[in-house]
Image (cartoon, rainbow, N blue to C red):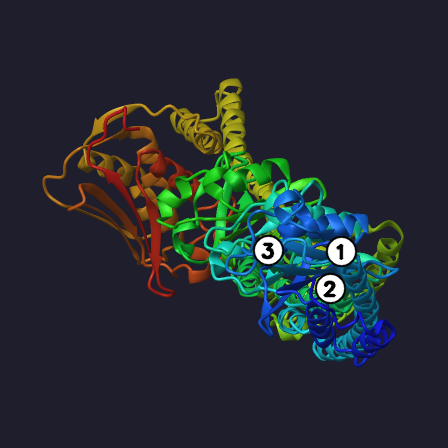
């Protein structure tokens, strides 16, 4: 056996070993010195030193042979630790001497190529500290039985001292690492808190993560609702495959477990993890750390650290990542809080602006156009539309739209429940549909009608209480990125829109009611005044102004009492209205010309908004009074006209009786009978005129139709009045066109028309004047009759009314009942004709009427 360096001076050798291994605290230096001491001390051909972590996995392998250090295979080292002699030594905490590895099954038969193929004798000692295993120190020689017990003892001493030195160096290194980590984390914390922009915070987290733990890739998943959604990543090649990653919060997936336990998890090889899915185009992940991101006691997400190597991370690495994650979580929470505040401020600003826009007008069209523009601008969608429920059919009708295909969608109707919008209108439930083609409620007919392509839809009901007014719909949000908060915001907008729409509808109805009232007010046949409760005039309709001859400026602001001499009556009415809300009676109001016009007054208290006013409806009594006077005059005239023929009849009868009883009286009985007969005829004619006028007005007269010669009709009527013309020295002429066709009509009525017109003409024509009757044929196939006189004429203001009942021209000395021309008008119109007068003052008057040349009874 070869002499060893410790055989002559064991104590000196021990002291040298201790001195060599306790000099310095550099791990790599201690490993190399321990390995070199072992090889040189026992005279080995080759030595190896494997360092392990707390779980017994190889951290590093160093080989020493031929005076040089080499790095060994971690894969083979882990096999040795699991299946070979090194693992056995560590597990049993016992040093081993093997005289010949060919005879020991603990030795692996597949040594590292080119290095251990010659191994026969082996010394192997565990390096163990009181706290944990450090590693395995192994020496190899090519000669069987090369070492003895002293050699094993020497190797065990070196291993023990190396373990102590390595533990001390490790502790020192850990302290240095902790100090460095603390400094690094403080620096990183300062960096992360230097910004509150979330995307920038996430970028900085991933950028600084490499300073605390080595990795191939890393990701940040943030909690969004009930899912963990990837929001930042680094080290991945296939970005498209990564950007849509998300995991449920609850479940067995390792991500869910990290969030549930709120502790970091280390996985030696996630490929063995149940439910793990690899992303196509992304490197395979083996070593993995997941650390929860928790801030202020609330989880915000998960930080993941990836390695392409198995067993790449230890629990110490996990603790470091967890410490880093704590700082990252605070930075993320602060950035999220700022983003939430900014979002909330943006939402409040948006809602405020929307409210301002919606209340800027009470016109429904303006309200909805403003709403759509504001919504589209805020949410950046392709299109926005408002569909309102038709109050009659309950169909949903698209009234307004903005964005793509806006003009095409306006007017489109959906039946109740049809399509997504129809479903929302029917149920009152808001709806977000990310992919409309996958939703059974989707109605493609609108796209087919408009040529628009809809990908996603957000629709919310516009409601007041339980009444659904319509639906606010957004089409194609950017990247489909709308969440519950956006839906809530849109519902708030819909609530504002509902109030605005309701207000606009109320305004429209109020305006329509006001317009109806204004039309009724202005177009009323009766004059109307509006005053304050004190009687100050605030409004007057056109009828009042026209009737009284005032301008609006003349009366507005005036007291009603200033327009009437009956001021006490107005004061009494005002008091009564204040107590009972209404009053009325008769009142005279002075016109602009100074004429007192009598009115029947109905005064009522009305509300206009919050103010009270009095509405004075005035009915002009002038015509009624005139008619009453006309009726009184008529009664007197009728009595007079009836009395005269009756007096003639009675006088004739008395004379006839006297002649019969006294034969000595020589009176002309034939003349007396003739006077009585003519007086009776006049009496019958007056009574028939009154009765016929009533029957003609009621449409109850049965005309006796016959063909009448125009010349014969004119001759008969002129013959009847010719004695009267001769008695008054008035020239009566007739001018008839030749070959006039016959007229179909009632001979008696037409004779009475001509007689009345001739009688009036003779009555108003002075002696020496002329009355002319003409008849001629007009191209319109009608016969035109005219009766002209040379009397004083008819004032223009009375020409339109002289055909009314009981109307007579004021100032005329001749009397009359006022029913003759009214009879003529009704009789001519009963034949399908028209009657009118043409006159100039001082030039006489011409009464004209037309009759169709021939008429059938069916036409009449």
User: Contact (CB < 8 A) between labels 3 and 1?
Assistant: no
* Foreground label between 3 and 1: 3
Q: Which residue is denoted by mark 3 in the rendering?
A: 119
- In this rendering, does residue 514 appear at all? no
Q: Secondary structure at mark 1?
A: loop
Q: Is residue 555 above or below residue 758?
A: below
Q: Quadrant of the C terminus?
A: top left
Q: Which residue is denoted by mark 2 in the rendering?
A: 321
Q: Is residue 494 above or below residue 669?
A: below
156 relative to 416 in the view: left or right: right
Q: Which residue is denoted by mark 1 in the rendering?
A: 264
User: Contact (CB < 8 A) between labels 2 and 1?
Assistant: yes
Q: Does label 2 or label 1 sit earlier along the sequence?
A: 1
816 relative to 50 in the view: left or right: left
Q: Residue at x 53, y 58 (%)?
A: 365
Per the rendering, the mark at residue 9 is: none
Local crowd at mark 2 within 10 Å, few (<14), some, or many (≥20)?
A: many
Q: Position of residue 845 (x, y in %)?
A: 34, 57
492 relative to 403 in the view: left or right: right
Q: Secondary structure at mark 2?
A: helix
In the image, farthest residue toward the top: 661
Give how far apart the Cα atoms at labels 3 and 1 are. Answer: 44 Å
Q: Which residue is more in the foreground, 497 or 798?
A: 497
Q: Position of residue 562 (x, y in %)?
A: 76, 71
- In this rendering, does residue 804 appear at all? yes
Q: Does label 3 or label 1 sit earlier along the sequence?
A: 3
């Amino acid at each position: 056996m070869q002499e060893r360096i410790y055989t002559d001076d064991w104590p000196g050798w021990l002291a040298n070993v201790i001195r060599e291994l306790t000099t310095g605290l550099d791990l790599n230096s201690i490993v190399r010195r321990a390995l070199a001491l072992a090889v040189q001390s026992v005279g080995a051909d080759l030595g190896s030193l494997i360092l392990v972590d707390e779980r017994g996995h190889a951290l590093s392998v160093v080989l020493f042979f031929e005076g040089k250090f080499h790095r060994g295979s971690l894969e083979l080292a882990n096999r040795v630790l699991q299946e070979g002699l090194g693992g056995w030594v560590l597990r049993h905490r016992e040093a081993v001497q093997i005289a010949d590895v060919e005879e020991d099954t603990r030795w692996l038969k597949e040594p590292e190529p080119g290095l251990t193929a010659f191994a026969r004798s082996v010394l192997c000692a565990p390096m163990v500290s009181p706290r944990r295993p450090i590693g395995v120190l192994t020496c190899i020689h090519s000669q069987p039985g090369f070492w003895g017990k002293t050699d094993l003892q020497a190797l065990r001493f070196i291993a023990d001292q190396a373990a102590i030195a390595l533990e001390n160096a490790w502790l020192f290194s850990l302290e240095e690492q902790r100090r460095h980590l603390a400094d690094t984390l403080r620096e990183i914390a300062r960096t992360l808190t230097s910004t509150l922009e979330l995307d920038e915070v996430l970028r900085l987290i991933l950028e600084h993560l490499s300073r605390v733990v080595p990795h191939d890739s890393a990701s940040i998943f943030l909690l969004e609702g009930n899912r963990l959604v990837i929001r930042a990543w680094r080290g991945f090649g296939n970005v498209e495959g990564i950007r849509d990653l998300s995991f449920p919060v609850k479940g067995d997936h390792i991500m869910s477990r990290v969030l549930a336990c709120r502790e970091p998890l280390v996985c030696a090889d996630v490929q063995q993890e149940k439910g793990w899915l690899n992303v196509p185009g992304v490197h395979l992940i083996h070593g993995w750390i997941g650390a929860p991101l928790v801030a202020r006691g609330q989880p915000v997400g998960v930080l993941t650290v990836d390695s392409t190597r198995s067993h790449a991370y230890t629990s110490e690495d996990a603790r470091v990542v967890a410490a880093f994650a704590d700082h990252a979580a605070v930075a993320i929470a602060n950035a999220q809080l700022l983003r939430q505040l900014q979002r909330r401020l943006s939402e409040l600003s948006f809602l405020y602006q929307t409210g301002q826009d919606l209340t800027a007008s009470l016109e429904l069209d303006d309200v909805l156009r403003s709403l759509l523009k504001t919504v589209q601008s805020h949410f950046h969608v392709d299109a926005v539309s408002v569909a309102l429920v038709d109050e009659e059919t309950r169909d949903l009708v698209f009234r307004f739209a903005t964005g793509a295909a806006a003009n095409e969608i306006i007017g489109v109707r959906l039946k109740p429940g049809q399509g997504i919008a129809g479903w929302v209108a029917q149920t009152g439930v808001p709806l977000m549909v990310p992919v409309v083609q996958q939703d059974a409620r989707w109605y493609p007919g609108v796209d087919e009608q408009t040529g628009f392509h809809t990908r996603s839809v957000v629709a919310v009901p516009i409601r007041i209480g339980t009444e659904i007014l319509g639906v606010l719909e957004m089409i194609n949000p950017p990247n489909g990125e709308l969440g519950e908060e956006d839906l809530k915001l849109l519902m708030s907008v819909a609530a504002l829109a509902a109030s605005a729409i309701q207000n606009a509808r109320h305004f429209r109805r109020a305006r329509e009611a006001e317009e109806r009232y204004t039309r009724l007010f202005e177009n009323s046949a009766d004059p109307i005044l509006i005053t304050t409760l004190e009687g100050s005039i605030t409004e007057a309709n056109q009828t009042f102004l026209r009737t009284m001859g005032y301008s609006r400026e003349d009366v507005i602001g005036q007291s009603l009492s200033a327009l009437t001499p009956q001021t006490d009556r107005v004061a009494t009415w005002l008091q009564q209205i204040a107590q009972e809300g209404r009053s009325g009676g008769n009142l005279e109001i002075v016109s602009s010309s100074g004429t007192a016009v009598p009115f029947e007054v109905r005064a009522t208290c009305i509300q206009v908004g919050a103010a009270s006013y009095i509405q004075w409806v005035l009915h002009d009594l002038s015509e009624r009074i005139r008619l009453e006077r006309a009726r009184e005059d008529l009664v007197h005239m009728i009595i007079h006209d009836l009395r005269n023929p009756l007096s003639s009849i009675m006088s004739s009868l008395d004379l006839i009786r006297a002649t019969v009883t006294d034969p000595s009286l020589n009176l002309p009985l034939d003349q007396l009978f003739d006077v009585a007969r003519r007086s009776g005829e006049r009496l019958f004619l007056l009574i028939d005129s009154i009765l016929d006028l009533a029957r003609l007005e009621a449409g109850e007269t049965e005309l006796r139709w016959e063909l009448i010669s125009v010349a014969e009709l004119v001759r008969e009527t002129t013959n009847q009045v010719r004695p009267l013309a001769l008695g008054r020295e008035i020239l009566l002429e007739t001018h008839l066109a030749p070959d006039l066709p016959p007229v179909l009509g009632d001979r008696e009525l037409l004779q009475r028309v001509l007689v009345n017109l001739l009688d009036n003409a003779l009555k108003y024509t002075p002696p020496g004047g002329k009355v002319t009757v003409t008849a001629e044929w007009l191209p319109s196939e009608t016969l035109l009759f005219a009766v002209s006189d040379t009397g004083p004429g008819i004032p223009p203001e009375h020409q339109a009314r002289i055909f009314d009942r009981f109307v007579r021209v004021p100032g005329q000395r001749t009397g009359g009942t006022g029913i003759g021309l009214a009879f003529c008008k009704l009789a001519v119109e009963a034949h399908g004709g028209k009657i009118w007068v043409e006159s100039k003052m001082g030039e006489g008057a011409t009464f004209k009427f037309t009759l169709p040349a021939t008429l059938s009874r069916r036409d009449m």
